Image: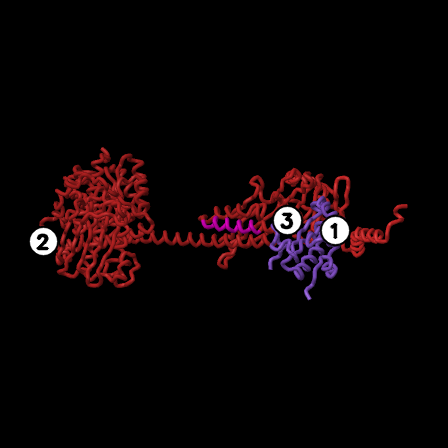
Chain colours: A red, B purple
Amino acid sequence: MHDSLKTRDQLLEEVTALRTRLEEPEATLSAIQSGQVDAFVVLEAAGERVYTLATAELLHQLQVITDSLPVLVAYLDREGRFRFISRLYEPWFGRPLHEIAGRTIAEVLGEAAWASVREPIDAALSGRQVAVEQWLDFPETGRRYVHITLVPHVHAGQIQGLVSFIQDTSERRRAEQALRLLADSGKLLAESPGGEGMLAGAGRLAVPALADWCAFELGEEGGGSRRVVSVHADPGCRPGQVAPCSRLDVPLLAHGRMLGTWSFVYAESGRSHGQEDREVAQELARRVAVMLDNSRLYRELEAANRAKDRFLAMLSHELRTPLTPVLAMASRLLADAGLPAGLRAGLAMIRRNVELEARLIDDLLDLTRISRGKLDLHCEPTDLRQVIEQALETCDESKLAARRLVRDFDAEEHFVWGDPSRLVQVFWNLLSNALKFTPPDGTIRLRSYLGESAGAGAEAGPRQLVVEISDSGVGVDAVALPHIFDAFDQGEAGTARRFGGLGLGLAISRAIVEMHGGSLTALSAGRERGTTLAVRLPLPAAGFGVGRAADGAHGAHGADVAAIAAIGHAAGAAGAADSVADAAPRGARPESPVGSALRILVVEDHADSAQALADLLHAAGHRVTLAGTIAAALAAAASEVPDLLISDLGLPDGDGDDLMRALAGRYPGLPGIALSGYGMEADVARSREAGFSVHLVKPVTFEGLQAAIQRLVAAGSPRE
Amino acid sequence: MKDPTAAPQDDPATPAPPGQGAPGYWDLRLYVAGQTPRSVAALANLRKICEEHLAGQYKIEIVDLMANPQLARSDQILAIPTLVRKLPPPVRKLIGDLSQTERVLVGLDFQPHH
């Protein structure tokens, strides 16, 4: 053969080539033998495919890793059968891995659980990655709140199955719920006025998070306890309808006091309370208890405050009642033209001081009104110059006479929208203050001008009428200046005395000015440099159209100081208006007393007051019947029907309101004037409601009473 | 030092590092099958050897045949892991997990400095 003739060189070459070709298979074999390879590429009909020898090892690794995860990991095929599961499933499903593998979810967890996850699983098997949070029932651990992530497994363009991750978020959810519960309770408690409404709100927070129903039992005064509120998650169910399966009783403890018990009950749901539930319930109960206790303290405080207001009102009534006959008598005596001059001065002093005392009592009452926001203004176009003159007329004449008074009323207009009586009160306070500070021979300067409200920037603010009252007195320290308007709260105890009375005048004045939309400020250059008090009141944009006419009448008042009377402060303003009757916007009122004689039934248990009133009414031409009690008044009315009833409200055998109601029932249209030491708005409203046409607050001057009678006559209400 | 393998490893479009084609430059391709124990061992061994002996003078490309079995064709790969030395020529294959460092160095044609 030709082959047998190969040369040695040829053979060597072939051997070398063969050896080279064998090198790779040899190296491969050697590597396989020494365990250095664990996978091979095999050429199949469909192409190359990799086979590995390490399957078992890889599977073990996979199991180790998935078992270590704090989530349930599983691979499900397209039929929803478990193909791979991490070991965490064992305690959750209550069966070994090989009892789960190859089964469907329905087989392992039951049809109900399968139904609850069917939708996300179908979504994942259609190629969408899904993440849901939901409740899921497990055989061993029961109902858990889980976060489920489902990732579809796509291979070669086909969905092969899905990888499922299930994370137990029950604890986190519970913690979040507890936090939300406590936050909601904070909101509820902050907004709740307390009481049973608050308990019902708290109960609604607690169900169903902490109970199917809950109930509050509160301790009673005399011992024992009473169920106050119960709240059921299902309004259709009654507490106790289903036997409780878990009950948590938490004490309502506040400031060391046991107020009651809050019971949380699971019945219908079959759930039970854990330690976390107990902690949240206790915290909730603590908050509710503190709120309960606070609202109790608040109620007690409010009751005490009401009692204080009532006491102040009663006190002022008792203090004022004796002033009425004194004022009435002094007024009547002063009206006697034949009075010797010395006696007249003495009587004037008596009247002035009684009026002063009445003011102090009024201040106390005003302060309680202001502090309760119950001071009402009766506003009308008001000339501030008249207000100031009226205030001056009721100031201490001797002090006024000893000091120089300069009026620089430079403002073009002086009409403001205000309550004349309250503004007189303000300026009386300010002038009295200036008088006290200014030594004899000193000067008090009154100045008015128009200004604009501060802080309006480039645009002019609303116009203001500014009235300054400057004294040349001792002045005020810069440090003390901001505090001179504080009631009872002045830095220096001695200052209050010097500001007069109870030190309330400036506080009340500022409150009244602010209620008018204005401001009251104090300026002082320091000690011994005098003080300026500035009142700023807003001017109406268009004026009242009466300024000029009133200007003409300016100065007409003051001619008859004695004629100016005060029913409280209100009649003071009314009197001033009378003296400028031709120009004043409220119109004219005849100076003469009542035009016709009336039959008047006067009911007053304070004998002196009753007699003084009767004398004055007699003098005015009326026929007066006196009664000291409701019974006597009813008897008197029965024997002769009166044209008018004038009655005190506090009577020995009942309330003046009751008398008015009884008489108005029997004699429809009978007008009534109430005389009362109680000037609170509620008191006035009550007497109006009883049928009184007019409510006069003591001390009542005769002029004030006459004016009221006149108004009733003018209104045509007295009976035929 | 920069790890040349930090670049996407089985992407042929990766820009070549400086010095490619120069003498003393190693262009290596490692075929693996997913994360089989030997594949991962080969990766670890190769990285260690290159860092120690060929610092700055090599490029490693990694081909996962589990993901792309058809890539076995070009280098006619049979057993995994297999390292292919593309440079310096001639092309050589080292089969196995590269656990015998001396044999790997010889196979790579690495001349230790004396």
Label 1: element kind: strand
Q: Position of residue A608 (x, y in %)?
A: 22, 50
Q: Nearer the viewer, residue A133 or A49?
A: A49
Provide the residue designation for mark 2. A340
Structural crowding at the residue carrying mark 2, measured as other residues with C-alpha within 10 Å and reported as few (<14), some (14–19) or many (≥20): few
Q: Is residue A680 magenta?
A: no
Label 3: element kind: strand
Q: CA distance from mark 1 to mark 3?
A: 38 Å
Q: Residue furthest bottom?
A: B114
Q: Residue at x 86, y 51 (%)?
A: A7
Question: For the residue marked with disc 2, what is the amino acid?
Answer: Pro
Q: Chain of mark 2?
A: A
| Whether residue A510 is situated above or below residue A693 in the rendered picture | below
- Predominant SS along the magenta part: helix
Question: For the residue marked with disc 1, what is the amino acid?
Answer: Ile
Q: Position of residue A565 (x, y in %)?
A: 18, 47
Q: Residue at x 12, y 55 (%)?
A: A343
Question: For the residue marked with disc 3, what is the amino acid?
Answer: Gln
Q: Position of residue A536 (x, y in %)?
A: 23, 49
Q: Are marks 1 and 2 in contact (CB under 8 Å)?
A: no
Q: Nearer the viewer, residue A432 or A142?
A: A142
Note whether residue A568 is visible. no
| Magenta extent | A175-190
- Quarter occupied by residue A643: top left
Structural crowding at the residue carrying mark 1, measured as other residues with C-alpha within 10 Å and reported as few (<14), some (14–19) or many (≥20): many
